[in-house]
Image (spheres, grey):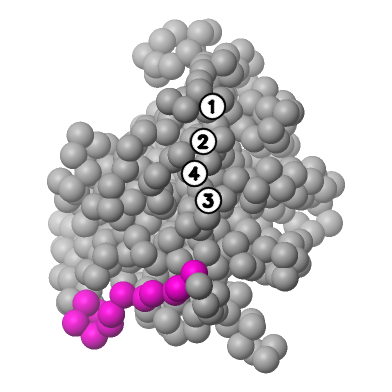
Amino acid sequence: MNLKYLSRLLLGSVLLVTITACEITQGAPVVVTQKTQTLPDAETVMQTIEKVANWQVARTQYMPHVGRAQLGSESYGRWIQGAFYVGLTQLAERSPNPFYETWIGYVGEAHDWRMGKVKYFADDHVIGQMNLWYYNRHNNQAALVPVKEVFDWLIEQNPTNDLTFIAGRNADRLHNCQWRWCWADALFMAPPTLIALSNATGDQKYIEYAHKEFQATVDFLLDPKTGLMFRDSRYFDRKGKFDEQIFWSRGVGWVYAGIVNSLAQLPEDHQYRPYYENLYMDLTQSIIKLQKKDGSWPMSLLAGEKDPYPESSGTAFFTYGLLWGINQGLLSEKEYLPQILNAWTVLNNAVHPDGKFGWVQGVNDKPDVVAYDDSQLYGVGAFLLAGSQMYDFVSNNAISN
């Protein structure tokens, strides 16, 4: 990182701390009560998601609060930060404060808009969604080039590995399924990036590759009985602590949000759009009935009320997808809004007075424990996605009324 960009990053951090301090002293945490089912107003929603974003941006380079995941969390280009920046782009589109878009530009330029280190690995592709968002708004070729280089290389490799999960990026290529999308999270990380790249370049080979691999992953990991996605093949026969089959909330949330983000990039008349819309509708029907009474989704989706934790990252991804469906006219407001508002209550209750977003399960691949103080970048990204869709919904509601 050269001194020019470093100084700009430091200046941005100083400005952000000032903004954060002002918001902490001026605004109380939002409380949306489940009992009244009251719609928040657009200004309140924006204040809340900005407060959460401000807390997190001030800590992207120093994150001792995440414990053992600190090194990976502070590493630019990896999925942990990438998922946060996907959410931040959506806030930047809606906020009247230009800081967020400026910050994205600072961060990208400071790191030469590079992708993650492992060229074939889907988790290292999600940062490309930030690159392409910025490219589309500023015609910044420097943001486009690294994304195109990675995917041109990957498509040329054309991996055909079996999708049976054998972990380890140090394994030989033949036996490493992660050359392809053999885990649920990958459907959030890579496909929307490829589809956006097709839109940016006009080259349909990226959409074709994304669709081929997306279908392969769904065919392999979708459980026809429940309509849910296994996290990976290791969980086909695993049971949770309540003797339930394990379907991990955040894992299914990655898929749900990945479908939404892919649809958001596909043209309305694209031949593949019905496939993703059908997936979206089917998965919606599967997850909506699993919501707990408190408005959250259990970390192990089939554990139901036995799971006591109001985990926020999976709940945020589901809230995002449901709100997006209403905003796009795919879901009935009358049918789904009450459950969405219950979920929104849970998410707001996870926001600390200073803007920290809690109840986020740490880095994992299965259900575990979580606490109010637990926070992570990807959970914040999911909340920003959900909050941006809530902002659109209440803004449109105010106009129509």
Can residue 81 be spotted in the picture?
Answer: no
Picture quadrant where residue 368 is located: top left
Amino acid on which disc 4 is placed = Glu
Amino acid on which disc 2 is placed = Ala
Residue identified by numbered label 2: 303
Marks 2/1 in contact by CB < 8 Å: the verdict is yes
Neighbourhood count class around disc 3 (C-alpha, 10 Å): few under 14, some 14–19, many 20 upward: many
Residue identified by numbered label 3: 292
Chain-order first, disc 4 or disc 3: 3
Amino acid on which disc 3 is placed = Lys
The kind of secondary structure element at disc 3 is loop
Residue identified by numbered label 1: 244
Amino acid on which disc 1 is placed = Glu
Chain-order first, disc 2 or disc 1: 1
Neighbourhood count class around disc 1 (C-alpha, 10 Å): few under 14, some 14–19, many 20 upward: some
Chain-order first, disc 3 or disc 2: 3
Residue name at image x 53 percent, y 8 percent: 174
Residue name at image x 57 percent, y 50 percent: 291
The one of 51 and 110 positioned closer to us in this rendering:
51
| Rendered image: mark on residue 305 | 4
Whether the magenta-drawn stretch holds residue 164 is answered as no
Mark 2 → mark 4, Cα distance in angstroms: 7 Å
Marks 1/3 in contact by CB < 8 Å: the verdict is no
* Residue 211 located left or right of residue 22: right
Residue name at image x 52 percent, y 64 percent: 342
Residue name at image x 39 percent, y 16 percent: 168
Marks 4/3 in contact by CB < 8 Å: the verdict is yes
Whether the magenta-drawn stretch holds residue 25 is answered as yes
